[in-house]
Image (tube, grey):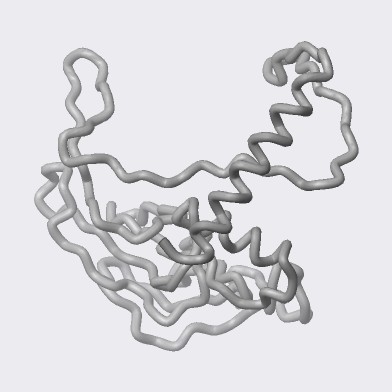
Amino acid sequence: MGLSDIFGRLIAVIGAVVIFLRRQDGDSLEPVYGSEPKIPRAKPQGIPTLKMPTAKGWTAEQMPTAAAGLKVNAFAAGLKHPRWIHVLPNGDVLVAEALSEPGGIKSAFDYAMFSTMKRAAAAGASPNRITLLRDADGDGVAEIRTAFLEGLTQPFGMALLGDRLYVGNTDGVVAFPYETGDARISATGRKLTDFKAGGLARGARSCSPAA
């Protein structure tokens, strides 16, 4: 267990204690869903708290419970922190794989955030790619798996408009040429918008579908 793992566990314990103490003020918890949600009043926080789930993959035997007459199987497995999927018109499935990467740690709070993300299996060496999954024989299992786009910067969102595939990286939006059936894109993309770290946009280049 590394230093950041120990630090992450310590932060989790401190957070759990703080949350427990805040719940001792006698307030009853009301539902915050539905047409008339009861939004709790805001409370000042000297120490920010966050309940971060720890990612844990399914075992080979685990399956969702399907309705009567239906069955479930794994379409694909072994992906590294998949963040978003996009189904192309021909049935191919694109999966963006990315992790938060260490960097810019300038304070104990930054280190605490990174340690917490790492404990949740959301930080580390990022694959920075989009993987293509193709079920060519229609049996519900992707027997074709290729690195569709590589060398990206923590990709997330994807959208296909005409013959352009738009990819939302953490540092900007990039457009790539696409033809139906492509299993890999090797062409250099055209960057349409720059993002500053943290998601703030800069620049004024067009991001229209015709770009």
Quadrant in the picture for the C terminus? bottom right
Q: Residue at x 16, y 47 (%)?
A: 141
Residue 168 visible in this rendered orientation of the protein: yes
Q: Residue at x 21, y 13 (%)?
A: 68
Where, by quadrant of the figure, is residue 148 drawn? bottom left
Say if 62 sits above or below 206 in the image.
above
Left or right relative to 46: residue 77: left
Image x and y of residue 46, in percent: 86, 46
Say if 78 sits above or below 38 in the image.
below
Left or right relative to 180: residue 191: right
Where, by quadrant of the figure, is residue 139 drawn? top left
Q: Residue at x 76, y 17 (%)?
A: 37
Q: Residue at x 56, y 54 (%)?
A: 8
Say if 204 sits above or below 143 in the image.
below
Image x and y of residue 102, in percent: 56, 73
Where, by quadrant of the figure, is residue 146 drawn? bottom left
Left or right relative to 70: residue 122: right
Foreground of the two, 53 or 130: 53
Left or right relative to 108: residue 175: left
Image x and y of residue 163, in percent: 43, 71
